[in-house]
């Protein structure tokens, strides 16, 4: 039975900021969580309405009628699938003194609930203080969106600090793009663009920006100011379009008709993000010093806009000298000075925008959904708390691939051709795209497969060994003469072996790979690096599926014997490993041992494979999460090791690949459970509660670092994610298997194992 969450909030088609906020949050939760969690909405209305709501709206409260609060509370209590309630609180949403009609709902509600305070006012009077403290006493948790709001709740309202959490206002995951190109695409030429958006009202103080614009125009005659959004419906209800007419009149008085464009409608998300993509400077001119948070301000920062903002608490907390400029309330001269300074310095604007983009990445809605659901987790059955597996998206793979090969690094999500190519990445990519083609038989895969195979062959020297680094123009990088290339050679053999084991490709490609493989085998016997040998064992195993050659089995035994020698030298009763430290791609080693067992039948390989893999898993699974060995500091034998950041997607993916093999061969349910946990690391089940896979691009971020997620989406990370995702395809989307993720209670696991 599914678990339900109920949101009490305003909701579209009602036009208000909280309705938009809640819609974005609900959509993000749905994108992150499996269908086993259902979202329902109790829509708040101010008087009789005839809104055409979406199907998730199951309850409606006219906030002016106490009886309707009571009725909804009773209905929620009677629904046993409802596990918890989220209440979006703003004083104006609930009728009564300071919105105290809300207690008609809260006093009867038997379900645990969390309250988000969208406004926290300083120096409350006795009545407001009483209401907030009473709400907090009844709630399981309190959410606010800024540290300043939390401080006010602790100091001015004396709320317990362990009950108040900060989850930032969400922002949308947008692509990193240059503004000049966006302007050309949208027909704005090369005009400098300022913008403000949101439902218009007197507190927006747009007139202050217009007065500043008159000064800015003197130095930038072609300046364009976009005023985006319709007038707030609540204001229209009381005074019509008085404020908009006031602004239009001021535009005429200041002779700005050619410099101001009003977009007088409620902007859908795509249109809004398009406008922000061309905005050189975002103007935030609110004159309300107690405005706790602004979604418009947050959205602009996340769209890489440098900001000029008045000193509301949210702006003072988030905006720093490297992302924008703070100004005093209703001071057009300060706005003009700041804008002229930024307009004269394109490099500064671009750097501020880039800094803003980086600074707000943790606030994307997917991360906000993860943080929010982490607070609801105690109320939801464990079996229903599952992350959604996103569809496969190859767009970033294609973007990073040229006719020569897979580019090594990216600048955020833009391929950085100056970094050139590596054999490592193209070998990985060949295996990944082979697996993708096996599953989907997409003809477009074949072009990529040929590119990656050709790159491997290009990197092969006359003696059969391989170089690793190639410049963008195809020249050989000097690093090939300065580094140990055994890992790259092992990866090449592994990729060629896998490719040749699949009889689904054109004969000319197979002949090319066969020729390369035969040359490579002439120069591998002296390789001794543990991971390099592990790659070789895997490649030889797959190659032998086709060849059935005793010479290949002999090579497998050679390399596996060396790994066993390493194990016997350093292992003891507390340290079951091949080296005196755990470093990178650790799961590859026991995986290779298990492949050696499959190739030879040698039971000792099987025993060591399981012992070492279980040892590794004991070090990297903690508190229901995977935490792979940090590249900031390896994990050493007989030393006190500290957990660090520096978790990389390749290590998680290698673990998933090994778990898949061990589960397939040994059938132990622990491996399937851990496989799912490991994949959820990409979705946000990690120490930061942040996504590592980027669904907007199809790329994968380059890892978890101390300061947050590394936003670059390079080859290694993106291919590693794809490999992990393809394994999930085998389990949960193959029609011959399950079509949804398993319940991880033992009873359900037993049923799953019977079906396999």
Image (cartoon, grey):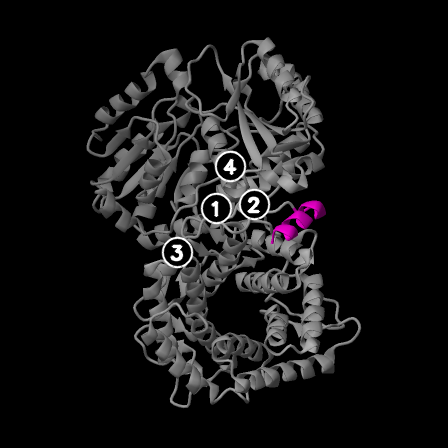
Residue wearing tag 4: 314
Crowd rating for badge 2 (residues with CA inside 10 Å; few <14, some 14–19, many 20+): many
Instruction: Give the mark, 2 or 3, whose residue is nearer the N terminus.
Output: 2
Report the span colored magenta: 744-756
Foreground pick, 309 / 584: 584
Residue 53 location, quadrant? top left
Foreground pick, 487 / 322: 487
User: Which label lies toward us, 1 or 2?
Assistant: 2
Instruction: Give the mark, 3 or 1, whose residue is nearer the N terminus.
Output: 1
Q: Is residue 677 visible?
A: yes
Residue wearing tag 2: 387
- In the image, which disc is placed on residue 394? 3
Q: Residue at x 71, y 62 (%)?
A: 618
User: Which label lies toward us, 3 or 1?
Assistant: 3
Quadrant the N terminus occupies = top right
Circle 2/circle 3 CB separation < 8 Å: no
Residue 475: % across, % down: 32, 79
**What's the distance in space between the residues labelled 4 and 1, CA to CA?**
13 Å
Circle 4/circle 3 CB separation < 8 Å: no
Instruction: Give the mark, 4 or 2, whose residue is nearer the N terminus.
Output: 4
252 versus 638 height, above or below: above
């Amino acid at each position: 039975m599914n678990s339900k969450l109920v949101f009490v909030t305003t909701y579209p088609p009602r036009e208000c900021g909280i309705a938009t906020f809640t819609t974005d949050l609900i959509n993000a939760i749905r994108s992150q969580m499996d269908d086993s969690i259902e979202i329902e909405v109790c829509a708040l209305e101010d008087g009789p309405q005839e809104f055409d709501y979406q199907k998730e709206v199951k309850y409606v409260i006219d906030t002016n009628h106490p009886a309707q609060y009571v009725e909804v509370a009773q209905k929620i209590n009677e629904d046993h699938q409802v596990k918890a309630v989220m209440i979006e609180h703003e004083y104006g949403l609930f009728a009564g003194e300071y919105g105290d009609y809300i207690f008609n709902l809260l006093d009867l509600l038997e379900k645990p609930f969390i309250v988000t305070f969208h406004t926290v006012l300083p120096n409350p009077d006795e009545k407001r203080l009483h209401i907030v403290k009473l709400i907090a006493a009844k709630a399981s948790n309190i959410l606010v969106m800024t540290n300043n709001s939390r401080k006010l709740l602790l100091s001015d309202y004396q709320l317990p600090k362990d009950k108040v959490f900060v989850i930032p206002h969400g922002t949308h995951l947008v692509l990193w793009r240059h503004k000049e190109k966006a302007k050309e695409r949208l027909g704005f030429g090369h005009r400098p663009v300022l913008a403000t958006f949101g439902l218009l009202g007197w507190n927006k103080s747009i007139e202050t920006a217009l007065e500043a614009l008159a000064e800015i125009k003197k130095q930038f005659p072609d300046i364009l100011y976009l005023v985006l959004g319709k007038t707030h419906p609540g204001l229209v209800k009381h005074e019509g379009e008085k404020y908009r007419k006031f602004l239009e009149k001021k535009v005429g008085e200041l002779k700005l008709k050619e410099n101001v464009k009003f977009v007088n409608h409620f902007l859908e998300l795509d249109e809004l993000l398009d406008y922000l993509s061309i905005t050189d400077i975002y103007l935030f001119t609110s004159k309300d010093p107690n405005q706790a948070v602004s979604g418009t301000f947050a959205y602009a920062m996340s769209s890489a806009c440098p900001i000029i903002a008045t000193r509301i608490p949210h702006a003072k907390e988030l905006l720093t000298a490297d992302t924008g400029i703070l100004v005093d309330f209703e001071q057009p001269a300060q706005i003009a000075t700041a804008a002229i300074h930024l307009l004269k310095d394109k490099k500064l604007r671009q750097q501020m925008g880039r800094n803003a983009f980086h600074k707000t990445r943790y606030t994307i809605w997917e991360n906000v959904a993860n943080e929010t659901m982490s607070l609801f987790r105690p109320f939801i059955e464990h079996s229903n708390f599952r992350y959604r597996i996103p569809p496969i998206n190859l767009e970033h793979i294609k973007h990073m691939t040229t006719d020569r090969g897979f580019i090594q690094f990216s600048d955020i999500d833009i391929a950085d051709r100056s970094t050139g190519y590596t054999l490592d990445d193209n070998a990985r990519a060949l295996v990944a795209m082979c697996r993708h083609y096996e599953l989907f038989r997409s003809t477009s895969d074949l072009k990529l497969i040929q590119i990656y195979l050709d790159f491997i062959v290009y990197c092969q020297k006359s003696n059969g060994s391989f170089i690793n680094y190639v410049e963008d123009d195809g020249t050989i990088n000097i690093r090939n003469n300065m580094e140990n290339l055994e890992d790259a050679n092992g990866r090449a053999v592994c990729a060629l072996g896998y490719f040749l084991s699949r009889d689904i490709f054109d004969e000319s490609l197979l002949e090319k790979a066969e020729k390369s493989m035969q040359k490579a085998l002439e120069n591998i016997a002296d390789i001794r690096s543990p991971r390099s040998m592990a790659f070789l064992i895997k490649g030889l195993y797959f190659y032998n599926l086709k060849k059935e050659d005793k010479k290949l089995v002999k090579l497998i035994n050679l390399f596996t014997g060396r790994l066993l020698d390493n194990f016997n030298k350093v292992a003891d009763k507390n340290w079951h490993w091949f080296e005196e430290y755990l470093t990178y791609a650790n799961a590859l080693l026991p995986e290779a041992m298990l492949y050696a067992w499959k190739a030879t039948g040698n039971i000792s390989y099987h025993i060591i494979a399981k012992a070492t893999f279980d040892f590794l898993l004991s070090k990297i699974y903690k508190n229901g999460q995977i935490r792979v060995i940090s590249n900031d500091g390896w994990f050493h034998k007989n030393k006190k090791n500290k957990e660090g950041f520096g978790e990389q997607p390749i290590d998680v993916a290698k673990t998933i690949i090994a778990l898949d093999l061990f589960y397939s061969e040994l059938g132990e349910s622990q491996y399937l459970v851990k496989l799912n946990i490991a994949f959820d690391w990409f979705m946000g089940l990690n120490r930061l509660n942040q996504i590592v896979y980027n669904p907007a691009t199809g790329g994968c971020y380059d890892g978890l670092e101390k300061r947050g997620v590394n936003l670059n989406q390079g080859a290694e990370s993106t291919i590693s994610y794809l490999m992990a995702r393809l394994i999930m395809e085998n389990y949960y989307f193959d029609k011959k298997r399950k079509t949804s993720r398993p319940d991880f209670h033992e009873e359900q696991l037993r049923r799953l194992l019977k079906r396999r």
